[in-house]
Image (spheres, grey):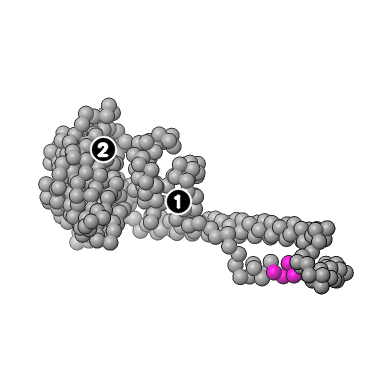
């Protein structure tokens, strides 16, 4: 189980929404969402506060488990040796006196026990043993702390070495690329996007390191498995430029080919990643699937639904107003029922939905999730699922936090 899944589990056990937990910790609901989806880790101060709110240890939140306070066999042998040495060091006459007193009392028919006035050696021994054990545990804690510090130091050294190696490797690669570069200057940048047509316009420029009279150039743009070739225009400074529009995808590569007679030399100018994905609004969903009740008479499950809160943001964290938003309960990516939209929460780009009725009997061996079907101002429709809250029911129990990698393509959903 990841750190985010542990935070989500404890939050839901306490019946807190992401917004309510954020208020307790003094952070935004978006921060809680990022922690629970493992997109970010809480800071040390927030981890301490989380451990207090959930009444768990920081080790448990980090997945390290609870440390055992039981002594190892070697540590037990050490304690026995210390106690043995202490008893061996006691004066022999005390033992003789105690034995004679006990034998005398047995002869008189009395219950064998040391006189009260002679109990103080055992009390003293007990106090000494307590001190010995306390000192031993202190030493063990100190050794454990020193071992942790040593491991941290080694990890820091390893990190520094890896950083230096990476830096040196990067500089060597840059030097080799510079030596083998065909261009003295190069650039490629996005100048326009048309989300309704799903296209992007890119301008490219390449100045050859060595210009030969009569040299030509072609710019090649690869996008979505297709290649587009555009002839370069020669400028007065012997630099070639081109401007073209290609389909908007998540992987676009721009390269230039210099042509001199029959010779053709190609070099990659720029690669763009995530342009298509970044053009969509970020959908943050919280709530939905709540408590689950298993019937005692038959093997079936009933789910209770919490209000669903949804925020729409772009890649810059700005609120985005959607043209149409619907939230529903899906079984194996097939619609079961829609939630009813309530009035917006007062914040731009925020939505609230509620299921009526607020409980429903669910089927076994099926995966359920809450998902939003959204349409933006450009007419694009996609599905955003709360992947961290997917749940599957079996006769033996329920498996939550499946972290299913749901597709956002509407063609993969039925509604």
Q: Which residue is more in the foreground, 121 or 358?
A: 121
Quarter of the figure with residue 307? top left
Q: Which residue is more in the foreground, 359 or 241?
A: 359
* Upstream in sequence: badge 1 or badge 2: 1
Residue 415 in view here: yes
Picture coordinates of residue 179 (x, y %)?
Answer: 38, 57
Q: Farthest residue toward the front?
A: 109
Q: How many marks?
A: 2
The residue lying at 24 percent from left, 61 percent from top is 395
Q: Is residue 394 left or right of residue 87?
A: left
The residue lying at 39 percent from left, 38 percent from top is 21
Picture coordinates of residue 134 (x, y %)?
Answer: 69, 56
Q: Is residue 204 left or right of residue 58?
A: left
Picture coordinates of residue 43 (x, y %)?
Answer: 47, 43
Image quarter (top left, top right, bottom left or bottom right) of the N terminus: bottom left
- Count residues near mark 2 (Cα–Cα under 10 Å), then give few for <14, some for 14-19, many for 20+: many
Classify mark 1: helix, strand or loop: helix
Residue 252, placed above or below residue 353: below
Classify mark 2: helix, strand or loop: strand
The residue lying at 11 percent from left, 47 percent from top is 415
Q: Is residue 251 magenta?
A: no
Q: CA distance from mark 1 to mark 2?
A: 26 Å
Q: Nearer the viewer, mark 1 or mark 2?
A: 2
The numbered disc on residue 61 is 1
The residue lying at 19 percent from left, 52 percent from top is 362
Q: Farthest residue toward the top?
A: 346
Disc 2: which residue: 307
Picture coordinates of residue 400 (x, y %)?
Answer: 30, 54
Q: Which residues are magenta?
A: 80-85
Q: Which residue is more in the foreground, 61 or 173?
A: 61
- Count residues near mark 1 (Cα–Cα under 10 Å), then give few for <14, some for 14-19, many for 20+: many
Q: Is residue 83 magenta?
A: yes
């Amino acid at each position: 189980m990841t750190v985010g899944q542990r935070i989500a589990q404890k939050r839901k056990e306490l019946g807190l929404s992401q917004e309510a937990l954020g208020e307790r910790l003094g952070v935004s609901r978006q921060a809680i969402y990022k922690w629970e989806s493992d997109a970010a880790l809480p800071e040390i101060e927030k981890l301490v506060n989380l451990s207090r709110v959930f009444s768990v240890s920081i080790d448990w939140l980090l997945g390290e488990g609870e440390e055992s306070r039981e002594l190892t066999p070697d540590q037990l042998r050490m304690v026995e040796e210390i106690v043995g040495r202490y008893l061996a060091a006691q004066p022999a006459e005390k033992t003789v006196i105690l034995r004679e007193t006990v034998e005398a009392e047995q002869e008189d028919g009395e219950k064998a026990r040391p006189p009260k006035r002679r109990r103080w050696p055992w009390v003293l021994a007990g106090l000494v043993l307590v001190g010995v054990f306390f000192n031993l545990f202190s030493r063990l804690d100190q050794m454990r702390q020193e071992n942790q510090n040593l491991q941290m130091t080694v990890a820091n050294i390893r990190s520094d070495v890896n950083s230096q190696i990476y830096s040196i490797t990067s500089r060597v690669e840059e030097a080799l690329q510079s030596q083998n570069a065909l261009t003295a200057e190069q650039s490629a940048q996005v100048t326009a996007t048309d989300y309704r047509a799903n296209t992007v316009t890119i301008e490219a420029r390449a100045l050859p390191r060595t210009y030969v009279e009569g040299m030509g150039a072609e710019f090649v743009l690869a996008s979505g498995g297709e290649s587009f070739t555009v002839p370069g225009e020669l400028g007065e400074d012997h630099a070639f430029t081109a401007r073209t529009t290609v389909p908007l995808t998540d992987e676009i590569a721009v390269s230039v080919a210099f042509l001199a007679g029959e010779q053709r030399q190609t070099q990659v100018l720029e690669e763009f990643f995530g342009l298509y994905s970044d053009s969509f609004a970020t959908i943050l969903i919280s709530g939905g699937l709540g408590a689950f009740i298993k019937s005692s008479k038959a093997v079936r499950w009933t789910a209770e639904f919490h209000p669903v809160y949804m925020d729409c943001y772009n890649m810059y964290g700005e609120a985005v107003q959607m043209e149409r938003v619907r939230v529903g309960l899906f079984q194996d990516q097939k619609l079961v029922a829609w939630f009813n939209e309530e009035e917006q929460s007062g914040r731009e780009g925020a939505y609230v939905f509620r299921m009526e009725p607020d409980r429903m009997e669910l089927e076994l061996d099926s995966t359920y999730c809450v998902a939003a079907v959204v349409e933006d101002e450009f007419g694009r429709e996609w599905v955003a699922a709360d992947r961290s809250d997917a749940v599957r029911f079996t006769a033996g129990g329920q498996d939550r936090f499946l972290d299913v990698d749901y597709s956002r393509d509407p063609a993969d959903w039925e509604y």
